[in-house]
């Protein structure tokens, strides 16, 4: 039996709009960054210093962009300690000013890749997705660069692409399993890596055909090189809504770095016929100009781009709490039918934030936890929770309290999933940071690889700490609503 019951006071916010996972991703733009950009120390192998050769590559690239129609810029590319490169204002920039104006000639799209790739017709006839076509062309361009052939149209751009990006595709299986244990991002990391693996497998017949026809050097098109190409696409591919969502590598524009408080991003202007950027703030000469990669959590930034922002500096940070209808629920079939009526799936993810509860969380949790005595009560319950956003009394039991208790239990269970305590992770972060700053560290060979591994472990520990802080805060807020 139901009785209308008013909502108790609590913190609510709209649900976070999620973006798709690779390979068909929706991202804005990535910057050039070495792995992680945290706990940096001076090192020769980890970050390339701006040597004469590097400066020449940069000058060649800037000259090439001008030759291809890039107009005079109000920004320039500079080296940024711990970040690689960024775009800096060369003159005063006003809020809302039209900047960059990158022409189509500097956009590397799947259509261009299919036409220019040495076995593009094979890829097209095989019906392979844009992601794989672009990756194949990147491998070809990289091979030409390695062989000393700089005649390619895209050679100045390829010369500036990093060998290592720091994204999740460069982690080992052991790191994914160990460093992300307990985090909901572990499953997302696995899915990204599996997508890249599937893309590698699906291109095999095309590679075999191209090799048979003498179109490629088979030894150049290895799985390791494709992994590099997939990493470049994961970290740099830009979705241009102004071109109906077409994805492209945007030469020059992808040198811009990300800030979480920036709300504007690159997009194609149909009227100007170029990629433009309108900053949401003014910049003085010499200041670095930032773009947005989207409203991403620290974990999403870590997986896709290989870096994290300073703790608690990202307003989009969230713990992705997954709730699922119990398959052993005696009313499972009827509850599932009621969810379908409201276009809801039996598994939902809710982004818990430190300062707010996501909309729909308590309603969905209450629906899962409720145990109506009769199946015909379930549609009525669903109508209250999902249609009217009201919490009724079910046999004198407050459905909101049911939802609160269910989420509290889910938070406690999530906390138990981590291998180390939060205090142990905090201690580990400080210990490893001190190790990186130790002047005696790095005397041995292969320092860059060791530093990258340590920084990955620090970043993952920071992520685990932040996630549990959010879980604890959510639990506190929910407990307050019960008083």
Image (cartoon, grey):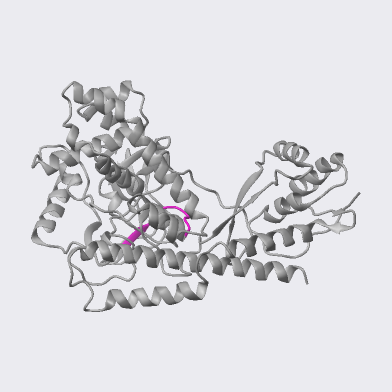
Using residue 391 as the reference point, say whether residue 342 is left or right of it: left
Residue that appears at 34% across and 44% down: 237
Q: Residue at x 39, y 55 (%)?
A: 174
Left or right, 427 with reference to 37: right
Q: Position of residue 216 (x, y in %)?
A: 17, 29
Q: Quadrant of residue 207?
A: top left
Rendered view: 400 above or below 243? below
- List x then y, in percent, for residue 416: 59, 64
| Residue 444 included in the magenta stretch of the image | no
Q: Pick the residue in front: 96 or 210.
A: 210
Q: Position of residue 214 (x, y in %)?
A: 15, 23
**Would you identify the image quadrant in which residue 440 lies?**
bottom left
| Majority SS type along the magenta span | loop
Magenta region includes residue 294 = yes
In this picture, which residue range is highlighted in magenta? 289-297
Q: Quadrant of the C terminus?
A: bottom right
234 is higher (above) or lower (below) than 82? above
x, y percentage for residue 477? 67, 69
The answer to whether residue 196 is left or right of residue 467 is: left
Do we see residue 99 in this rendering?
Answer: yes
Q: Is residue 263 visible?
A: no
Q: Image point 34% across, 75% down: which residue?
A: 433
């Amino acid at each position: 039996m139901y009785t209308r019951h008013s909502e108790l006071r609590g913190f609510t916010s709209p649900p976070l709009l999620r973006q798709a996972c690779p390979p068909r991703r929706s991202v804005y733009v990535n910057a050039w960054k070495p792995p992680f950009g945290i706990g940096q120390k001076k090192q020769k192998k980890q970050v390339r210093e701006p040597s004469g050769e590097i400066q020449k590559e940069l000058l060649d690239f800037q000259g090439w962009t001008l030759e291809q129609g890039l107009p005079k810029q109000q920004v320039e590319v500079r080296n940024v300690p711990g970040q690689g490169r960024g775009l800096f204002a060369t003159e005063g920039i006003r809020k809302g000013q039209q900047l960059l104006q990158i022409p189509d000639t500097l956009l590397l799209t799947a259509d261009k890749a299919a036409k220019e790739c040495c076995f593009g017709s094979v890829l097209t006839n095989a019906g392979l997705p844009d992601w794989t076509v672009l990756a194949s062309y990147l491998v070809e361009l990289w091979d030409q660069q390695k062989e000393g052939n700089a005649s390619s149209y895209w050679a100045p751009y390829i010369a500036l692409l990093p060998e290592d990006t720091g994204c999740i595709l460069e982690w080992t299986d052991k790191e994914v399993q160990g460093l992300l244990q307990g985090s909901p991002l572990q499953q997302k990391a696995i899915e990204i890596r599996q997508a890249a693996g599937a893309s590698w497998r699906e291109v095999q017949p095309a590679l075999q055909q191209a090799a048979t026809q003498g179109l490629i050097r088979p030894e150049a098109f290895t799985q390791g090189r494709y992994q590099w190409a997939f990493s470049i696409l994961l970290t740099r591919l830009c979705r241009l809504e102004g071109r109906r969502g077409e994805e492209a590598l945007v030469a020059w524009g992808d040198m811009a770095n990300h800030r979480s408080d920036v709300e504007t991003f690159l997009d194609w202007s149909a009227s100007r016929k170029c990629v433009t950027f309108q900053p949401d703030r003014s910049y003085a000469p010499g200041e670095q100009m930032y773009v947005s990669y989207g409203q991403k959590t620290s974990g999403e930034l870590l997986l896709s781009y290989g870096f994290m922002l300073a703790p608690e500096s990202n307003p989009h940070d969230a713990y992705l709490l997954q709730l699922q209808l119990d398959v052993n629920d005696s009313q499972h079939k009827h509850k599932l039918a009621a969810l379908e009526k409201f276009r809801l799936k039996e598994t939902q993810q809710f982004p818990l934030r430190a300062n707010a509860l996501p909309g729909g969380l308590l309603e969905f949790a209450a629906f899962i936890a409720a145990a109506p005595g009769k199946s015909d009560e379930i549609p009525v319950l669903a109508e209250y929770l999902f249609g009217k956003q009201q919490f009724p009394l079910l046999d004198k039991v407050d459905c909101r309290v049911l939802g609160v208790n269910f989420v509290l239990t889910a938070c406690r269970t999530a906390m138990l999933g981590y291998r180390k305590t939060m205090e142990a992770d905090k201690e580990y972060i400080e210990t490893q940071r001190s190790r990186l700053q130790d002047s005696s560290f790095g005397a041995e060979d292969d320092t860059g690889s060791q530093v990258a591994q340590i920084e990955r472990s620090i970043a993952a520990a920071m992520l685990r700490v932040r996630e549990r802080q959010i879980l604890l805060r959510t639990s506190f807020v929910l407990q307050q609503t019960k008083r």
